[in-house]
Amino acid sequence: MRASAASAPRVDLTLRVPAGARLKVYTSDGAVEVFGVPASLDAQTLSGDLLFALPPRAGATLTAQSLNGSVNLGDGVEARGAAGRVLRGKFQTRLGEGGPAVNLFSGRGRISVETLAEGAARTETARRAGPGGGASTGAASTRRAGAGPARVRETPDDAPFKPAPQRPGPAETPQEVEEDEVVRVESDLVTLNVSVIDRASGRGLHGLTASDFRVYEDNVEQTVGHFETAEAPFDLLLLLDLSGSTARVTDTIRTAARRFVDATRPQDRVGVIAFAGEVSVVSPLVSDRARLRAALERLAAPKGDTRLHDSLAYALDFLERAADPARRRALIVMSDGLDSTLPNVTGVGSNTSYEEIRSRVQEFDGVVYAVWTNTEYYEAFSPEDIQPETYDLAYERMEGLAEAGGGVFYAVEKLEDLAGAYERVVADLGTVYGLTYRPTNKRRDGSWRAIKVRLPRRADAVARGRRGYFAR
């Protein structure tokens, strides 16, 4: 289901979804209330409030973060009989016996987590905590707890944070929904990850604020609604090409990957995927560095030929599924670029064309860095050998992926220099800022919208990032 465009009148949207659904709800300023626990939940809003109401005896693995607001835990949420409390920043815990992943994020709003009393009316957590730190409650309409499907409701930002009263109307006719159907509530937000470097030295610039940036869409200036500093956390995915000639230097690649992990910041989560003709998830996105190092020790070359484009598509899908909505995203791909679809490259290549994967990278809500490795060790003595022109084309395509993804292209002539390239990538990520805006052009006509980011007060600064998107 697609929400109305921002120019349309506000609506009070209620969704009933199967308990086995994977639910993602992103809004700009509307409040979101979720009753029940779906198979997984990602709820994100820039300035609205979030409420998550947990049925009795239900469990969840909860992550709640409000950058500039609060996280309010109701009575009995952390443990039976435990008093509620108000927190700042990020909160992670296992509710009950644990269970589905629930990720709640708000830029400036309040996040409330409540436990519904069995057979009793739901009480509403107050908008502000009392002097003693406990959350006061007020009257609300009746919502009986149970094992029914999860419900999501989006309300106008300026409305009181409470359920709308039930209105009499015709009885609802239940509709069958397949478990694998995707229910989407989409907003018209555009998010940008922008790396800023000094024009002369090429070094990243730290300490910039929202007032330093100007964002233009099709040459029309936009209003930045949300800004994240370069210190905000990342979900980083390292995609390693272990096909062909690189398979014989797995130890070198493993050592470089360990250096990459060691260089990342403690607040960043890191995942690793290796590929050849097949894809192997070496490690999911985790913050446990010891777990990452142990996973890298088991790193081995997958089977098959080189399917770079398909593996990139898999990595982008992986980040869409696994990344935390509260974090920025970056994909770092290491490869010689020789997909088996290229001339004289043996094997069965990708089903995804280069043009298709470049378009996907261009629309990716994150940053893509490309680390090209030179595997042209021998001259082509036969027309059947890989020709220099093919190596040049692979180089250019890797460079094009970094350009489309708003990242940086690094050329590594010797694999022994790979670790240094990774350390430069991590340093560059430390100068990436997050910007979000709602386009003044509300039409969703599928056209390409060109984006430019300027820093008029910093003549020495150059901004790199996403160059546009398709308004679908």
Image (cartoon, helix red, strand yellow):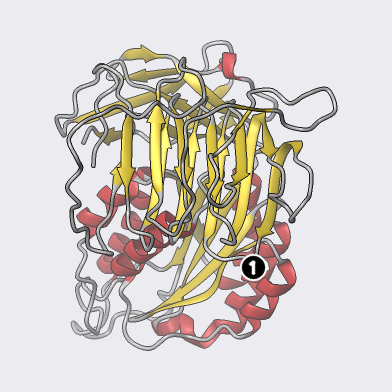
Residue 330 lies, in percent from the top left, at 50, 51
Q: What kind of residue is marked 1? A: Glu
Q: Residue at x 73, y 63 (%)?
A: 262
Looking at the rendered image, the quarter that the N terminus falls into is top left
Above or below, comparing residue 192 to residue 383 in the picture? above
Q: Nearer the viewer, residue 338 or 169?
A: 169
Residue 251 lies, in percent from the top left, at 61, 83
SS class, disc 1: loop
Residue 52 lies, in percent from the top left, at 54, 43
Q: Residue at x 65, y 52 (%)?
A: 268
Residue 431 visible in rendering: no
Using a 10 Å C-alpha cutoff, classify the residue at mark 1 as few (fewer than 14 neighbours), some (14 to 19) or many (20 or more).
Answer: few
Answer left or right for 207 relative to 237. right
How many numbered marks does the figure carry? 1
Looking at the rendered image, the quarter that the C terminus falls into is top left
Residue 265 lies, in percent from the top left, at 71, 52
Residue under label 1: 97
